[in-house]
Each structure stands twice: as C-alpha cells, then as structure tokens.
Amino acid sequence: MPDSSSSSPIRLLALDLDGTIVGASNQIHPAVKRAIHAAQAQGVQVAIATGRMFRSALRFYQELELTLPLMAYQGALIQAPATANSAAKIHRHLTVPKLAARQLLDYFEQPQLQDQLSVHFYINDRLYLRQLNAESIEYSARSGIEATAVGDLRLLLGEADPAPTKILAISLDPAMIDNLLTSLRQQYPPEELYFTKSVATFFEAAHPQVNKGAALQYIAEQILQIRPEQVMCIGDNFNDLEMIQYAGVGVAMGNAPDAVKAVANWIAPDVEQQGAAAAIEQFILSKAEVEL
C-alpha cells in the first residue's frame, strides 16, 4: 500500500455504502453527508464503490450529487447514470461465465446445502431467485428493489440470455459462508472466478477481473488520470480489501473484521458513530484547513 504520509493531496474519495456510510437506518447520516459535501467543496471528487445493484445504489449517488461513474456489484459494473443532458454510459461490465454459473448452481443445490442457501442471480440490473423466503424478502426490502422468483435459475442461462453480473448466496449461518469460500476457492483459482463476502452471511461470486480495487484503479487512472497516492477510500468488509490496498489512504471502519483493519492505514470509528465523517475530517478537511 502507498505511504499515507505522502504530501500529495487527496483528489478522489471512494466510499463503500453498507457498513461504511450507510448504517442500520439504511440512510446516510447527516454528519457523514456534511463531511462528504465539505470534501467536494475542497475540489475532491467522490465515488461510490458498492456490492449493491446499480439501481439499489442509485438513490445514494443522487443524494450525494455525484458525477463520477458508479461502481456497483463489487466493481463488475461501472456505469454513469443518465442525466438530463446525457444518456447512461457503461464504462465496464464484466459478467460471470455461464458455465461457471451453472456449476455454482449445481454446488449450491446439493442436498446438504439447498435448503440453507438463498441463491440470487443479478442479470441486466435485475434480481432473480428460485423462490422468495424470509432472507430474500428482507434483502429485497433493504435494497429497495423487487425480486423475481423463477423456480429453476438454469432457465436464465440459455444461449441467447445475458450472463449474470453477480451471484449471491445468503445463509443465516456465517460458518457456512466461510466453508463455501474455502471450498470453492480450492476448486476455482483467482483467474477463473472472484469470490468474496460483503457481510458475514453473504457469499458473492463474480468475473475473475472484478474487485473494488480494480474498479477504483479504473476511475482514478483512466478517467481522472491521478495516482494511487491521491486516492482515499473507506470500507468495512472483505469486499473492500483490494481498494483499501490500492488507495494511498485506505481507511477501515471500526466495525470491520480484524483482517480488513490489518491492511488499512487508519481505523475509523464504527458506522453508527459516523466514522466516515471522522476519516474525511482527518485526511481531507483538516489538511485543507492547514493549507489555508
């Protein structure tokens, strides 16, 4: 990770949503919003990097009045929303190969797993699952999107159908999610599929080139043409590891797992204590005041 003591000013701030700037209320706390807007007033560009669907993250993007492309699905989809003056623009969209999607579905539907996992396919920014259950209904409500039950998810993997952007398996048992990660990482090397978890009960699979660090690198170097040491990011879970490692200033929330905190430059207070606002004050706003 680049040295956070570098004198290069922060020009890009990348923010995870859930567990970072969005807490139990499913809203951005006013103190965090004020800090983000203060950073923008200092000329810092702000971007969202989330595991959420594009359509689920869009309301936060609009609330913060952002202009950079939104990094959704762990960075599998990098898209600029439509505006009054321009159409939506997809910068990058990497999908799970259909063969791998079928193989994962076979794995999840083993007798000892099938009744304990809720499997979600994301296709064309829509959510599909085998059947609605308590976990999927709660997930859909928090995401603010409608889920479509289709029975056999294999019906969505025909030759003419688009491939899934992401596959999510939810279990109420965190140990089962850890076992899935261990087992499937033994079967699929990193160059074949990307596996992560965004919360303890979410197993996520994506294209092998997908992670938030790669998406953030694209925004920083291809769009803004800036260096990693001019980038700050804030995240709270294992799906944020790569972007924390990429950024010159990588911040982990106080509610992050210890393994995530271990790679960060700084540990912020918990999300319910508006830790993102404290991090922005520490690395952006206080430095701007010193320069003045």
Image (cartoon, grey):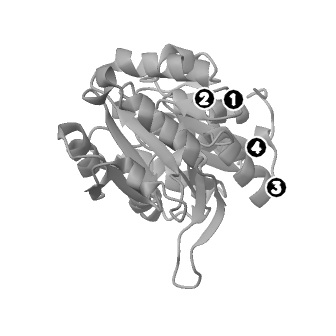
Type of amino acid under label 2? Leu
Q: Residue furthest bottom?
A: 85
* Image label count: 4
What mark, if any, has residue 230 been given in the picture? 4
State the SS at label 1. helix
Q: Are marks 4 and 3 in contact (CB under 8 Å)?
A: no
Type of amino acid under label 1? Gln
Q: Are marks 3 and 2 in contact (CB under 8 Å)?
A: no
Q: Residues within 10 Å of mark 2 (few under 14, many from 20)?
A: many
Q: Residue at x 57, y 43 (%)?
A: 99
Q: Are marks 1 and 3 in contact (CB under 8 Å)?
A: no
What mark, if any, has residue 225 been given in the picture? 3
Image vertical order of residue 232 relative to residue 121, above or below: above
State the SS at label 2. helix
Q: Residue at x 41, y 23 (%)?
A: 255
What mark, if any, has residue 241 been given in the picture? 2
Image quadrant holding the N terminus, namely: top right
Q: Residue 204 at x, y = what percent?
A: 48, 35
| Residue occupied by mark 1 | 245
The CA span between labels 4 and 1 is: 13 Å
